[in-house]
Amino acid sequence: MPAGHASIAQRETPTEDLVGIGFGPANLALAIAIEEHNSNCAPDRVLRSAFVERQTGFGWHQGMLLEGATMQVSFLKDLVTMRDPGSRFTFLRYLHERGRLADFINQKSFFPTRVEFHDYLAWCAASFGNQVSYGSEAIAVRPVQHNGRVGSLDVALREADGPSGGTEQVVRARNIVLGTGLRAQLPEGVFAGEHVWHNRDLLFRAKELKERPHRRFTVVGAGQSAAETADYLYRTFPDAEVCAVFTRYGYSPADDSPFANRIFDPSAVDDFYDAPEDVKRALLEYHGNTNYSVVDCDLIEELYRTVYQEKVAGTERLRILRTTALTGVEEIARGARAVVTSLTTGERSTLDCDAVVLATGYRPRDPRELLGPLAEHCLTDSQGRLRIDRDHRLLMDDQVKAGVYLQGAATEHTHGITSSLLSTLAVRSGEIRDSLLRRTHGRALAPAVGVVLSGDVPFPAALDTEAVTAPSGR
């Protein structure tokens, strides 16, 4: 067992230096940064950490691991390379151990498939199995008073799939890191059901439909996930019509030009954090088309070719319903009925479907939902948003000495567009680790840890069905 680590159930010490809530890529990168510090430091400088994850094993957007779909981020932006190219957790080291390094090089590509990158993440996570309590859900964070101040935090846990009143377990930490990921966004008034679901469940739900005849699928949304979903359903169910519904005139291409991509550089986080508020807003607006509600050009062209070739052949199995809004959904026998309205003519139509798939993005979780009474101590700006220090620590009043760190879109207003993406995970994990070391040992001799809350990408208004897509790239 690596120094300074054990599963929560095995803990003998009453207080951890860090408890990480959620164990996706963000907190996995943090676990690596901490482990690399612990393996090279004196025993009295070890950071004691543990993580909890509600899934029963490691998994990242598994419902969208579509065959052949590639990442939108270079393999060099893995969990460690941008911080430490010599780490044993690089993507290249993974390829070498899997016996595919030469084969990957011969592809002449920076972009692995999503399936392969997920395997890389799982390969990294396997080294930390004894530090993660899988199948456990954090249900509350409670302040613990020391001499009139909150010096530590109790994280209440419950079995993720157990009864709501099941046995509660508590682990105490000096710091917490919230890495709880994104929450699926559904249009206002629309609820998931047997035949109405978010695209995050695509592969799981599509399996249930393969053994019967099909008539139609409706896909709502205009981003990368929506385009991939439409393409997947078109190829997987050759007897079905696929209707792509979005309020735009067409799919918009992602800007992945070299200069625009500099918005994903680690140094861009410093630029954004120090910028005046009006500049922050402008940067998010200028460069939203690098990530939000946009599609890779190759996929756009492939879908357009399909539509055109069907027009030549006199068939129309892939239908693009542009400038059209979803205005109603209801479950019907063995399917769902979507009501759509043309924004240009006002004409309403109904589409009876095997399923309505909502590729309508994600939204961030407000960390205060989990913090309970501690939320009263959070500092906010003039717009009521959480104030977050450059080291990703939530700013609190003087009564709170325990640290709460945030990973994810809950920090986009302070740290910029990369907050919920993969691009800066390696560097950010080192920053959080070093902050924890300073707070725990007085100076950052090596990487540090804390409890980190990771949120989701900020979303447009609830009625907007073309929200942010899952971070499969950048």
Image (cartoon, helix red, strand yellow):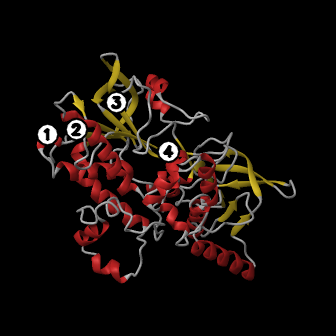
For the residue pair 113 and 12, the one nearer the viewer reads as 12
Q: Quadrant of residue 238?
A: bottom right
Q: Are marks 3 and 1 in contact (CB under 8 Å)?
A: no
Q: Position of residue 208 (x, y in %)?
A: 51, 54
Q: Amino acid at mark 1?
A: Asp
- How far separated are the C-alphas under marks 4 and 2? 26 Å
- Secondary structure beneath label 2: helix
- How far separated are the C-alphas under marks 2 and 1? 9 Å
Q: Amino acid at mark 3?
A: Ala
Few, some or many residues within 10 Å of mark 3 (<14, 14–19, 20+): many
For the residue pair 361 and 3, the one nearer the viewer reads as 3
- How far separated are the C-alphas under marks 2 and 3? 14 Å
Residue linked to disc 3: 402
N-terminal of the pair, mark 3 or mark 1, is 1
N-terminal of the pair, mark 4 or mark 3, is 3
Is residue 133 visible in the rendered image? The answer is no
Q: Are marks 2 and 3 in contact (CB under 8 Å)?
A: no
The residue located at (49%, 24%) in the rendering is: 376
Few, some or many residues within 10 Å of mark 2 (<14, 14–19, 20+): some
N-terminal of the pair, mark 2 or mark 1, is 1
- How far separated are the C-alphas under marks 3 and 1? 20 Å
- How far separated are the C-alphas under marks 4 and 1? 32 Å
Q: Quadrant of residue 354?
A: bottom right
The residue located at (85%, 58%) in the rendering is: 344
Label for residue 441? 2
**Residue 404 left/right relative to 147:** right
Few, some or many residues within 10 Å of mark 1 (<14, 14–19, 20+): few
Residue linked to disc 1: 44
- Secondary structure beneath label 3: loop
N-terminal of the pair, mark 4 or mark 2, is 4
